């Protein structure tokens, strides 16, 4: 058997699927593309997570777009983090091009321009459905990890949450949280000491500073009501297509704390909300996290542990998470080991560090008798990638240098007017883009403090009146005592007899 025939047979056997799958491209060997060696990704294993990596300009975003639109076509909803602002074109069909037609002829599949149903979401002031969550929904443990609190500070935050639960004080936004922490060491100090123990001002001060730092990155806009319901991410159109939910994040690239806060809260909410599915034939939802290094940048060990735990557990909910980044080393190795599908675009070997990274990357892929993986990693063209997936039994597929298909949708961004039109048709805008500021901990505590101050003023005024009354009473007694003595003298029997005796002598 010739080498090419053996290669084709290897790909056909390794990527053969009984269930539904996505054709992502065709395998290549020695610069030749084999249309009868198509690379297929089984829907059944897409909840095993994945990685799309490669140097700038090698086609990562287009690969993400290919996967998202094909998942939508199969009825699987998608959530994409758009940090560069270049994913919105998936809402419009591709205009087509002769190069696209030539590429698909090589791959052996037809090219059909097609748009996907899109929902634009926003974490900041950008246009779209507003994403929010309440402080209470985070809870003290998750919030402590996001704020990178010490063990003592975490204990204080837990006490604060317990106090709010016991006293029915809703914690909705950061304003509420700051108010209750300040209250614990000022106006409510005695109440907290009596029921929950003392808190040092240095610890509460440190917590407040970290909350302010989160506010400065836009956290004040994220925390509040109405809370976004994650079930709205898994909507299906009447035609059976899954919605592609795009979160526009291109204005928060310099705010990694806000991004990681949002991502962790979203994953935690999805995990707690979605039911167990086990190994089903297709995932419930796929998340693509573009510029994934931002979620790990400046993250504490506790936060990384939390992300790792969720990545391990969320698979059973039918959720797949795909990280998109320049280099696989951007993703912690504990998380990288959990990723089933790896799509590796070309890497650059300009420096010694680059060469070390390429060597490490090559070691993450199955050994292949057809490729020198390190050499292939630096020679792939735009729209080409090394692929290793999991077959329907969870086994790694053969390594395949793949010519990827082209996106069916527009490989360009939408104009402002097109985005406005898309948002105008949204059924979620009226649900989430409203201002709600109901009475919560901030307002309740302000009233409590105001009432306490009124009571204190009343007590003070009462004491002052009592002092005045006592003083007046003593003065009155001092003024009346001499008169009483004179009256007693004038009315005594001895005095009267003496007067009568004098009068008698006078008249004689």
Image (cartoon, rainbow, N blue to C red):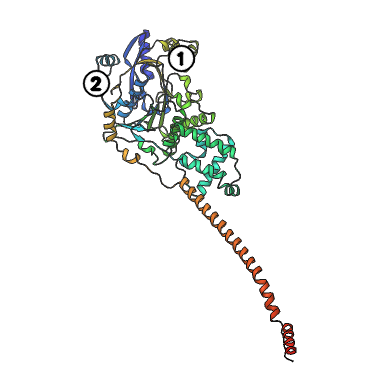
Q: Is residue 53 above or below residue 316?
A: above
Residue at 57% of width from left, 43% of height from top?
A: 185
The crowding category of the residue bearing disc 2, from other C-alpha atoms within 10 Å (few below 14, some 14 to 19, many at least 20), is few
- Which of the numbered marks, if any, corresponds to residue 95? 2
Measured as percent of width and height from the top left, residue 264 is found at 46, 33
- Which of the numbered marks, if any, corresponds to residue 216? none
Q: Secondary structure at mark 2?
A: loop
Task: List the residue tagged with mark 1.
Answer: 367
Measured as percent of width and height from the top left, residue 206 is found at 56, 35
Is residue 370 something that shows in the picture?
A: no
Residue at 73% of width from left, 88% of height from top?
A: 506
Query: Are the residues flagged by discs 2 and 1 in contact, CB closer than 8 Å?
Result: no
Measured as percent of width and height from the top left, residue 415 is found at 28, 26
Q: Is residue 311 above or below residue 507?
A: above
104 displayed left or right of 459: left
| First in sequence: mark 2 vs mark 1 | 2
Name the quadrant containing residue 32. Answer: top left
* Identity of the residue furthest to the bottom in this view: 508
| Quadrant showing the N terminus | top left
| Of the two numbered discs 2 and 1 in the rendering, the one whose residue sits closer to the viewer | 2
Is residue 151 something that shows in the picture?
A: yes
Q: Is residue 185 above or below residue 483?
A: above
Measured as percent of width and height from the top left, residue 192 is found at 57, 47
How many numbered badges does the structure rendering display?
2
| Quadrant showing the C terminus | bottom right
Residue in the foreground of this view, choosing between 260 and 42 = 260
Q: Secondary structure at mark 1?
A: loop
Residues at marks 2 and 1, CA–CA distance in whole angstroms: 40 Å
The crowding category of the residue bearing disc 1, from other C-alpha atoms within 10 Å (few below 14, some 14 to 19, many at least 20), is few
């Amino acid at each position: 058997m010739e080498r090419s025939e053996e290669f084709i047979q290897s790909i056909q056997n390794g990527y053969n699927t009984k269930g539904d799958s996505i054709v992502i491209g065709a395998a290549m060997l020695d610069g030749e593309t084999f249309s009868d060696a198509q690379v297929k990704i089984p829907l059944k294993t897409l909840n095993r997570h994945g990685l799309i990596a490669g140097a700038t300009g090698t086609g990562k975003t287009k690969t993400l777009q290919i996967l998202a639109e094909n998942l939508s076509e199969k009825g699987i909803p998608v959530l994409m983090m758009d940090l560069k602002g270049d994913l919105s074109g998936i809402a419009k069909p591709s205009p087509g091009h002769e190069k696209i037609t030539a590429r698909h002829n090589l791959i052996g599949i037809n090219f059909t321009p097609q748009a996907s149903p899109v929902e634009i979401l926003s974490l900041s002031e950008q246009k779209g459905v507003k994403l929010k969550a309440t402080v209470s929904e985070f809870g003290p443990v998750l919030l402590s990890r996001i704020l990178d609190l010490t063990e003592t500070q975490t204990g204080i935050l837990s006490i604060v949450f317990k106090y709010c639960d016991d006293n029915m004080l809703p914690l909705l936004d950061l304003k509420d949280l700051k108010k209750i922490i300040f209250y614990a060491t000022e106006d409510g100090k005695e109440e907290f000491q009596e029921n929950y123990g003392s808190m040092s001002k240095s610890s509460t001060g440190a917590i407040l500073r970290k909350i302010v730092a989160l506010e400065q990155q836009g956290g004040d806009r994220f925390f509040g009501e109405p809370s976004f319901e994650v079930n709205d991410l898994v909507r299906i159109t009447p035609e059976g297509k899954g919605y592609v939910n795009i979160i526009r994040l291109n204005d928060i690239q310099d705010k990694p704390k806000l991004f990681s806060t949002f991502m962790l809260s979203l994953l935690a909410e999805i995990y707690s909300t979605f039911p167990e599915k086990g190994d089903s034939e297709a995932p419930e939802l796929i998340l693509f996290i573009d510029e994934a290094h931002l979620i790990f940048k400046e993250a504490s060990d506790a936060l990384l542990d939390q992300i790792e735990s969720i990545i391990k557990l969320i698979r059973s909910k039918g959720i797949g998470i795909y990280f998109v980044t320049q280099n696989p080393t951007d993703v912690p190795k504990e998380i990288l080991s959990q990723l089933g599908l790896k799509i590796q675009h070309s890497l650059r070997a300009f420096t010694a560090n680059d060469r070390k990274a390429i060597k490490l990357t090559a070691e993450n892929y199955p050994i292949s008798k057809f490729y020198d993986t390190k050499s292939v990693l630096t020679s792939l063209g735009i729209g080409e990638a090394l692929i290793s997936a999991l077959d329907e039994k969870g086994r790694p597929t053969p390594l395949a240098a793949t010519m990827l298909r082209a996106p069916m949708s527009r490989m360009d961004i939408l104009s402002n007017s097109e985005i406005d039109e898309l948002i105008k048709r949204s059924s979620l805008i009226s649900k989430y883009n409203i201002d709600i500021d109901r009475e919560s901990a901030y307002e309740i505590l302000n009233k409590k403090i105001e009432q306490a101050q009124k009571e204190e003023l009343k007590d003070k005024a009462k004491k002052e009146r009592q002092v005045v009354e006592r003083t007046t009473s003593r003065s009155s007694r001092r003024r009346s005592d001499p008169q009483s003595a004179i009256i007693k003298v004038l009315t005594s029997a001895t005095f009267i007899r003496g007067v009568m005796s004098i009068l008698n002598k006078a008249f004689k």
